[in-house]
């Protein structure tokens, strides 16, 4: 045994991290996969039902309705982030990288919301969007557009858009810093060639930087997907376990939480009889959705590097 480790000393450095990763990540995933095969309320005896929980999830009309509603909201956050937020993050990163006037203040102002807790962010936006005291409605009234005032937080159709705006405002600086780091890795000779060819400020971004940071862009798309599928706190604080008015802010993680722990009781689930079984089934489906997309992204990046 000692000779084995003497020939491979790097294993001793890997072992502590691997053991912790196995205990804290691999084992819980495996345990959840096993629990999803049982009918269990979390307290009493477990009954093995095989894949019946998965069958019920995709055949029970109420479950399917909640699943697709939550999934559509999670995907909406992802799509809006990719279409609007990531391009803005790239532009802001380029401005910081290019050292435009006031870049230090600009960088701090954009990144600072990352350090504000979710309840405080929601409170800030409540002050902005409240029907009676909200800054938005007061501003509309002050410019003679009182007919446009609305109870923004009480309109179901606006729910997920408000959640997305909050998330985007809070996380805008994180993606920006990723892109700033990627842009600093662009070879200087490429920029010098662009200068000599007469490329302007924005043309350099399109022709030099974007091709060079495409792997970072793909990584940010994946991170946005994972974040959209796992977002929980904003929807929970705004709409509770039920997911808001007509489940207008329901998302996949909140759907899992509701099935596992219930709306009004500690057991929840399917009539309080299969809370852990159905809850872990939803968690496993969510894990597979994230894992498959992450695997595809890794394959794309690997082929591009080749």
Image (cartoon, rainbow, N blue to C red):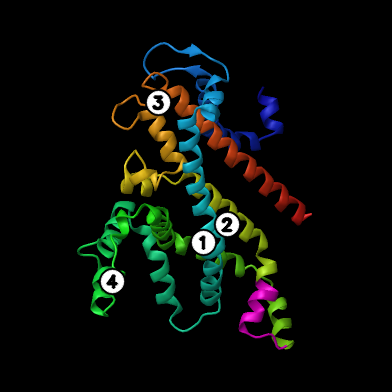
N-term-proximal mark, 3 vs 2:
2
Q: Measure the alpha-carbon separation of dots 4 and 1.
A: 37 Å
Q: Measure the alpha-carbon separation of dots 3 and 2.
A: 34 Å
Q: Is the C-beta separation of discs 2 and 1 under 8 Å?
A: yes
Q: Measure the alpha-carbon separation of dots 1 and 3.
A: 37 Å
N-term-proximal mark, 4 vs 3:
4
Q: Is residue 176 located in the magenta-colored stretch of the structure?
A: no
The quadrant the C terminus occupies is bottom right
Q: Residue at x 20, y 63 (%)?
A: 132
**Local SS, label 1:** helix
**Local SS, label 2:** helix
**On the image, numbered disc 3 is attached to which residue?**
269
Q: Is residue 83 visible?
A: yes
**In the rendering, at what x and y percent does residue 183 appear?**
61, 69
Give the vertical position of 156 relative to 250 (above or below). Answer: below
SS majority, magenta: helix
Q: Measure the alpha-carbon separation of dots 2 and 1.
A: 7 Å
N-term-proximal mark, 2 vs 1:
1
**On the image, numbered disc 2 is attached to which residue?**
220
- Quick check: 243 left or right of 67? left
**Local SS, label 4:** helix
Q: Is residue 244 visible?
A: no
Q: Residue at x 69, y 85 (%)?
A: 199
**On the image, numbered disc 4 is attached to which residue?**
147
**On the image, numbered disc 1 is attached to which residue?**
175
The quadrant the N terminus occupies is top right
Viewer-proximal residue, 6 or 232? 232
**In the rendering, at what x and y percent does residue 134 appear?**
24, 65
């Amino acid at each position: 045994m000692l000779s084995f480790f003497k020939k491979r000393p790097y294993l001793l450095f890997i072992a502590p991290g691997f053991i912790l990763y196995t205990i804290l990540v691999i084992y819980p995933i495996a345990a959840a996969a096993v629990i999803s095969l049982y009918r269990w309320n979390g307290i009493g005896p477990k009954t093995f039902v095989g894949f019946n929980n998965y069958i019920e999830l995709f055949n029970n009309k109420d479950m399917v309705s909640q699943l697709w509603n939550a999934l559509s909201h999670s995907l909406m956050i992802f799509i809006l982030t990719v279409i609007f937020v990531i391009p803005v993050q790239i532009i802001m990163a380029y401005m910081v990288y290019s050292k435009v006037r006031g870049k230090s203040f600009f960088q701090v102002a954009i990144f600072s919301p990352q350090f504000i807790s979710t309840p405080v962010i929601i409170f800030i936006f409540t002050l902005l969007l409240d029907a009676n005291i909200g800054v938005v409605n007061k501003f509309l009234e002050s410019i003679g557009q009182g007919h446009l005032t609305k109870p923004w937080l009480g309109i179901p159709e606006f729910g997920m858009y408000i959640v997305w705006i909050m998330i985007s405002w809070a996380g805008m600086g994180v993606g920006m810093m990723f892109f700033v780091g990627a842009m600093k890795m662009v070879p200087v000779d490429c920029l010098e060639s662009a200068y000599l060819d007469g490329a302007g400020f924005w043309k350099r971004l399109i022709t030099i930087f974007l091709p060079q940071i495409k792997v970072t862009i793909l990584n940010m798309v994946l991170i946005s997907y994972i974040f959209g599928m796992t977002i929980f706190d904003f929807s929970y604080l705004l709409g509770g376990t039920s997911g808001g008015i007509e489940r207008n802010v329901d998302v996949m993680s909140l759907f899992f939480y509701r099935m596992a722990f219930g709306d009004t009781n500690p057991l929840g689930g399917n009539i309080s009889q299969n809370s852990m079984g159905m809850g872990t089934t939803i968690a496993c489906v969510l894990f597979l959705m994230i894992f498959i997309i992450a695997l595809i992204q890794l394959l794309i990046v690997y082929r591009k590097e080749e």
